[in-house]
């Protein structure tokens, strides 16, 4: 027998700071489709047919280096390469979360259930439904303990687990600090114009759909430790008072 409390205990032992569970019925209600040309969100059952539950996982980024990206030379941007071109593109926090998610999936499989990390469900909406926090005015997940300084992952499983209660509170309330702090004005409350975001601009160095003023600000404000790496912008996260440690 596998219970929700067992799964949560193991996820925390592996190193996740936030853990919540949603049912297949809730998963079916989440939005899917293209997200700004960056990725495509999919139904859990399309990604992993045996799915009965999703374990939504949050990892606290306790050091800025977790936000480092490395991109292989020659990469131009999303939608600018043919399907037969392959490039290495790494985000440290993504690699850390994926590794830990595989550890949790392996543990579940060892107990006789099917499980695999998800690459396609809408994680922020799933996290709200799993009770981890709300989706804030900067469009990121805001948790009571860590604010927006968490990144998300999920494991889909055939285990029928007890789901958590969705998070209902709006932690942002009247605060507008993240919206006002964004140097490119990419944010409106609860919405982002993705192609004005400096993270998108950094990930798409030759894309013509990035406005010139955004490109100039990105070049000036983004720290690049090496020629093939950059630290993604976290200005809207740094502005958030919720969960701030210092």
Image (spheres, rainbow, N blue to C red):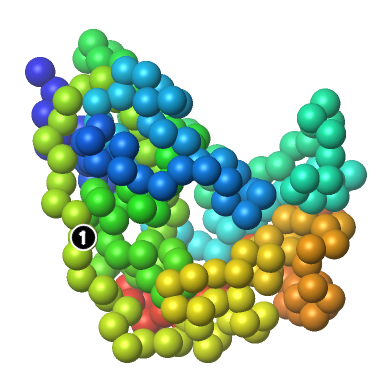
Task: Note whether 8 is above or below 59 in the view shown.
Answer: above
> Does residue 114 appear anywhere in the picture?
yes
Q: Which residue is mark 1?
A: 167
Task: Note whether 138 is above or below 87 in the view shown.
Answer: below
Residue 211 % position (x, y):
79, 73
Q: Quadrant of the C terminus?
A: bottom left
> Does residue 205 appear anywhere in the picture?
no
Q: Is residue 66 left or right of residue 109?
A: right
Residue 243 % position (x, y):
32, 73
User: Regarding mark 1 in the picture, which secondary structure is present there?
Assistant: loop
For the point 79% across and 36% down, the residue is 87
For the point 49% across and 70% down, the residue is 191
Q: Nearer the viewer, residue 147 or 227?
A: 147
For the point 37% across and 26% down, the residue is 45
Task: Note whether 115 is above or below 155 in the view shown.
Answer: above
Q: Quadrant of residue 49?
A: top left
Q: Badge 1: few (under 14), some or many (20 or more) residues near its Cα, within 10 Å?
A: some
Q: Quadrant of residue 212?
A: bottom right
Q: Quadrant of residue 116?
A: top left
Q: Quadrant of the N terminus?
A: top left
Residue 145 % position (x, y):
27, 67
- Label total for image: 1
In this view, the residue farthest toward the top is 112
Task: Note whether 227 is above or below 5 in the view shown.
Answer: below
Q: Is residue 166 left or right of residue 107?
A: left
For the point 60% across and 69% down, the residue is 193
Q: Nearer the viewer, residue 30 or 100?
A: 30
Q: Is residue 223 left or right of residue 115?
A: right
In this view, the residue farthest toward the right is 74
Residue 64 % position (x, y):
55, 64
Q: Nearer the viewer, residue 63 or 138?
A: 138
């Amino acid at each position: 027998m596998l219970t929700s409390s067992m799964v949560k205990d193991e996820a925390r032992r592996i190193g996740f700071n936030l853990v919540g569970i949603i049912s297949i019925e809730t998963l079916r209600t989440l939005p899917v489709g293209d997200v700004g040309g960056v990725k495509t969100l999919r139904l859990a059952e399309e990604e992993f047919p045996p799915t009965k539950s999703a374990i939504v996982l949050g990892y606290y980024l306790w050091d800025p280096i977790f936000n480092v990206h490395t991109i292989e030379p020659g990469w131009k941007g999303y939608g600018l390469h043919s399907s037969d071109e392959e490039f290495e593109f790494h985000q440290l926090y993504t690699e850390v979360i994926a590794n830990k998610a595989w550890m949790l999936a392996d543990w579940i499989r060892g107990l006789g259930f099917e499980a695999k990390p998800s690459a396609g469900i809408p994680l922020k909406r799933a996290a709200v439904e799993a009770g981890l926090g709300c989706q804030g005015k900067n469009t990121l997940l805001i948790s009571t303990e860590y604010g927006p300084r968490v990144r998300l992952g999920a494991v889909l499983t055939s285990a029928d687990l007890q789901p958590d209660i969705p998070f209902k509170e709006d932690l942002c309330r009247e605060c507008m600090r993240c919206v006002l702090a964004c140097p490119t004005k990419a944010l409106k409350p609860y919405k982002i114009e993705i192609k004005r975001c400096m993270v998108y601009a950094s990930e798409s160095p030759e894309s013509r759909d990035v406005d010139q003023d955004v490109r100039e600000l990105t070049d000036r404000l983004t720290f690049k430790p090496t020629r093939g790496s950059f630290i993604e912008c976290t200005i809207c996260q740094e502005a958030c008072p919720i969960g701030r440690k210092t």
